[in-house]
Image (tube, grey):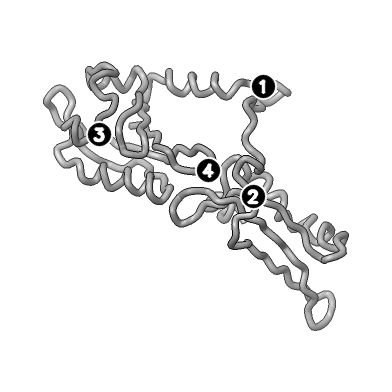
Amino acid sequence: MHWAADSFVHPSQRARFLKFLDFSTLEGRILKSATLTTESTFSIRMGTGNYSVKRVVVSRIPGDSEPARYLLFVLHAKDMLSPASVEKPDALVETGANKQVASGDLWQSIVNNDTVGIFWKDANRRFLGANHMFFEYYGLKPDDIIGKTDEEMGWHPDPEPFRRDELRVLKFGQTIRDAPGKCLVHGEVHNIMATKMPVYEDNKIIGLLGYF
C-alpha cells in the first residue's frame, strides 16, 4: 500500500490514505457499516500527471466459507468532488514537541540554502525565479533569466535532454532525479546533476521546481 500511496496519492493525503487502508482496523470499520463498505475521497494522480478527486470504496465480500473473506477495492472513474473540497495541507507544519513552523518560513529556508542551486519555471518552461546560489554559480542576475527557456539562455551544449526531462515533468507529473548533464559556466563546460519536480495549483500542474 505504501507503493500505491507514493505513486498515485497526493503527498498531503498519503498518511490519511494509509490510515484508511490500515488492515488492522479496516475489517472492523467495514463490519460496522450496514452496507459492508467504507469509503473516502482522495486526490489521485492520473496519467497526465494532474490530480483528480476520486471516491475510493472498499467492500467486504464473504468467501464460500468463513473465515475466508475478500476485499474489493473500487476507484470510481468519475470525479466526485472539486479539488477544493478535499483535505489540503495545513499552513502550519508540525515539527515535533508540539512546535509549529509556518510553511512560508520553511520555503524561505529551502530557497536560502547555499549548497544547491534552486530554480522554478512556468508551464512553458520559462524561468520564474531562482535562489542566490543559482545566480552566484552562473554569474547572472534575475533579469538575465526571467521569462527565458534553457534554449534561449544557450548554456547547454546539448539542450535536448534537459527539454525532454522538463516535458516529462510538465506533461506527466514525473519527478526527474539526479539526471546528469553538461552546462556552460563562464565559457567552460561543467558536469551537473539536476532534479526536477512538478508544481501544482488546485491539483493541476502549473510549472516545475528544480535544483542542481
How much space separates mark 1 and mark 3, taking CA atoms?
38 Å
Mark 3 or mark 2: which comes first in sequence? 2
Residue receiving disc 1: 100
Q: Which residue is mark 3?
A: 149
Which of pointers 4 and 2 lies earlier in the amino acid sequence?
Answer: 2
Callout 1 touching callout 3 (CB < 8 Å): no
Q: Which residue is mark 2?
A: 81
- Residue at 44% x, 53% y is 48
Whether residue 204 is situated above or below residue 78 in the rendered picture? above
Q: Are marks 4 and 3 in contact (CB under 8 Å)?
A: no
Q: Residues within 10 Å of mark 1 (few under 14, many from 20)?
A: few
User: In the rendered image, which residue does mark 4 sit on?
Assistant: 203
Give residue 116's mark. none
Find the distance from the CA under tag 4 to the CA under tag 1. Answer: 25 Å
Question: CA–CA distance between discs 4 and 3?
Answer: 24 Å
| Mark in the foreground, 4 or 2 | 2
